[in-house]
Amino acid sequence: MRVTTKPAVKVFAASAKSGAWSLAFSVALSGACSVYDPTLITGHGSHDVTSGPGNMGGPAEDDDDAAVVECKTGGFGSCPRAHAEGRCVDGACVIARCLDGYVDCDGASANGCEAKLDTAQHCGLCKAACRYNHASAQCSAGRCALGACEAGYGNCDGDDDNGCETDLNTLADCGTCGSVCTAAANARPGCKNGKCGILSCLGPYGDCDGNAANGCEERLDTPARCGACNGGCNPLNGDGMCRAGTCLVTGCDAGHANCNGLASDGCETQTDDVENCGGCGRSCALAHVERHVCARDGNQFRCAIDHQCTAGGPDCQPGAAADGCSKGYADCDGNPANGCETDLTRLTDCGSCDNSCVKANTASECREGKCVVTGCAPGAVRCGNDACRSLASDAQNCGACARACTGEANLCSGAKCTNQICSTGRADCDGDAANGCEVDLTTLENCGVCGQRCPTPAHASGACKNGLCGIGACDNGWKDCDGDPSNGCEIDIRTTNDCGECATPCIAPNAQTSCMGGRCQISQCSEGRGNCNNNIADGCEADFRLPATCGGCGNVCTSLRDVASSSCDDGNCKIVCGNGRANCDDMVANGCEADLSTATTCGGCTNDCTRLANVASATCEAGSCTKLMCRPGFADCNGDPADGCERSLTSATDCGMCNKPCAPAHANGACVNGSCEVRECDPGFANCNRDTADGCEASLAAPESCGACGNVCAAGAACTNGVCGCMTDADCATGLTCCSGTCANIVTRCFLWPCLPLTDAPESQLNCGGCGEICPLWCCDG
């Protein structure tokens, strides 16, 4: 290195005031120095000059030529530029030279040398940006360096070139490199937010204490913990058992039943009340009963009549049925099955049981519960206080009271006095002995009495019986229920009170009834009920809210295949499957048809191990997919079988294997058939060794590859923006000196005025007169 004598330059100050220059300077040079002549400075009027290194002012804003001329050649400090030495060329400022460590990357003179060569955007070379996979970047001494990793990623292979390549949310690297999540008791491990934990519990186990270290420590198939950590199995009013994590009702206490099929409310129904007497949905509806009661009959409960009435109670108010029967009816036979069967307005039981108004030869009525005699039957007469009787053969009262037969005709036959002795049922009605007893007294025209015609009974044919008019045969649909011939066949047995028989009410629980052809029928069921067994005796016995007839007849939710328990929800069967079974086709009829231990339904209906993402085959163990065989080009990188082989091994993040990114150093890469290839180098870098593994390893800002592969700078020489610097003067052209790696003309002097015409153009203000010397004014040759 050549040693150059450096001229001493003292600092001066220049300021503009009132349009006149005021200069104070003192210059000592090694050679002669001319006295400053202000006339040599042309074209300068009033200027505002700002002093400072590398910035010697610029054209005044009021310069007459400022609109068309940016600067004037030789102007005093006319071209200041950021981090650069400016020069005026043909009226325009250009950058003559950038300061060390800066470069003009955008080619715009106005902002000077805007790029600093020690940043991640321009590292040692213009636009040579540093970037790393899942990490920040920094620039040190003109070379890229790995910064901090992104959250959730780590540089586990120690290779800075591929950045932070490892996902730290996997079983193999959870939170930190090499931190392996191992399986705890009865659990499948998982990694979430960089911490090892429990992905899922195996079999009938649960993590009840929330401590991942001891795994899934509690069995969830015990009475204390059935299906959940706090889910005990202790059904109300009954006994239960826990099967496959489901609480089931195994038995109910006496007088209770599990009608809805749910274990959550146990045996919720009392079977000793009138709505569920002896069983679910068996509501009481006895004939003409006002108050029902569900009474114990041995070991069973049956519907009965509540004959007990508490004095002063709501059922014992005036007008209420004290014996539990509807008004006008009574339970005369003591059989609760047919309810209050007796109509107390009829002659046989007038006002009370067995209070019959039916008396021989008498016509009676039942009025307000009392018998009232209205007359005698046809052919019968009452004499005095005697009862009504026939006077057909009474010689003392022959045909009429006190009509005695005397003389020869002292006999009475057919209510006629005669001397003929007639056999029973015959009479001498014409009094002619010649024809004897000519009249048959058993006919409708002469019934017991000569000329006594029997009237036609109501709803019946007439008959003469024992000399009295009676009933022959009832018309179809009618019947003589009170035994009184005077009112004929008085009962229509086609009504719901007398259906087919006397005092046979047509009534059915939870139904509206009708009597058709003397047979009781259900015309309409109450809402939510049905007559599924077609038995009139129990009416609409089916409750469509219960599992046995859920929503309709035949929709049975009980006794289904592999069903542990069943219930009915708004007309739809809800079933709980037994251990390892499920109802995957949503068809109740075939029960829990799916086996949850197979690969196609592994632990759940939708968990088909064979259809997991990119899986070729798998098995099922403890309700989870295991032993995944991935399709070529895919892998299970996170260790979670739930999402299958979730990673493609032809992607930029997993090229050929898990967590092996295709991120070649300082390059754009592509993963082709599982191998990473360099497609394009980043600006400022090159793949000089043709090896993909280290990407574009060569920095074109490095001395060993300065600007291009193989362009090696001399030993110790710097490479600045892709150009090798000098080491000695010998590296420079004749007349130039090596100053800090730059060839400079130091045979110059610093002047306070522009360089004289016809001399060489002004030189750089850097290294003016010596290496490292800065001239704040004009640096001229000679």
Image (spheres, helix red, strand yellow):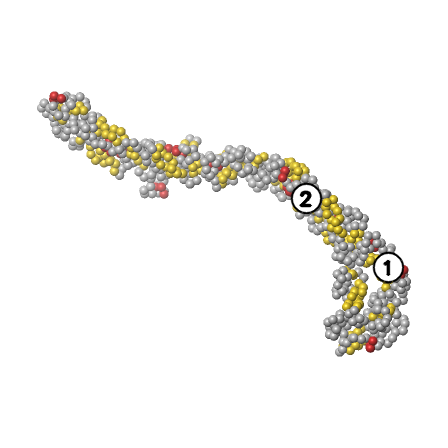
Q: Can residue 445 be seen here?
A: yes
Precedes in sequence: disc 2 or disc 1:
2
Dividing the picture into quarters, in which one does residue 509 lie?
top left
Left or right: 144 in relation to 208: right
Q: Amino acid at mark 2?
A: Arg
Q: Which mark is residue 566?
A: none
Can you give x and y, in whole percent of width and height, for residue 771 in the image? 86, 64
Q: Amino acid at mark 1?
A: Cys
Residue at the disc numbered 1: 726
The residue carrying pointer 1 sits among few (fewer than 14), some (14 to 19) or many (20 or more) residues within 10 Å by Cα, namely many
Residue at the disc numbered 2: 647
Can you give x and y, in whole percent of width and height, for residue 646 in the image? 66, 43
Q: Which quadrant holds the N terminus? A: bottom right
Q: In this view of the protein, which residue sits in the foreground, 223 or 24?
A: 24
Q: Residue at x 21, y 26 (%)?
A: 466
Per the model, the C-alpha gap separating discs 2 and 1 is 52 Å
